[in-house]
Amino acid sequence: MIAGMVQHAMMRALKCIAVVAALCAAPVNAEDTAPTPEPIWAFEESDIPVDPEFHFGVLENGMRYILREN
């Protein structure tokens, strides 16, 4: 009876250690986990040339805009 209780307690301890180890595991290489930057404009990943009449910009507050004369 006591041996079964000890075995049960040891199994719970091992499970807790495994969970903590999994949560605390550091990445091997920080470059592997670095997010890939999103393109600012959709055309940056396109093979279609951009119309030279478009003027692209970003305001001080981060809002992006495109201007083109009508």
Image (spheres, rainbow, N blue to C red):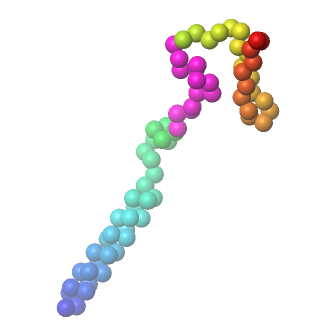
Q: Residue furthest front?
A: 70
Residue 44, x across and y down, in percent: 58, 20
| Location of the C terminus (image quadrant) | top right
Q: Residue at x 35, y 64 (%)?
A: 18
Left or right: 15 in relation to 7: right
Q: Which residue does the image show at 78% across and 36% down from the upper left? A: 61
Pinpoint residue 67: horizontal percent, then vertical percent.
75, 18
Residue 57, quarter of picture: top right
In the rendered image, the vertical position of residue 47 relative to residue 10, given as above or below: above
Name the one closer to the observer, 66 or 24. Answer: 66
Q: Which of the image's four quarters has the N terminus?
A: bottom left
Judged by its main secondary structure, the magenta piece is loop
In the rendered image, the vertical position of residue 47 relative to residue 24, given as above or below:
above
In which quarter of the view is residue 11 placed?
bottom left
| Number of disc labels | 0
68 to 57, vertically: above or below: above
Residue most toward the bottom? 1
- Does the magenta run of residues contain 38? yes
Residue 24 coordinates in the image, percent (x, y): 45, 58
Q: x, y (%) of residue 13?
A: 34, 75
Judge by depth and name the residue closer to the eye, 64 or 4: 64
- Residue 51 colored magenta? no
- Depth check, front residue: 9 or 56: 56
Q: Which residues are magenta?
A: 35-47
Image point (74%, 34%), residue name: 62
Question: Closer to the camera, 66 or 11?
Answer: 66
Q: State the residue at coordinates (52%, 33%).
A: 36
Left or right of 12 in this view: 59: right
Left/right of residue 66 with respect to residue 14 in the rendered view: right
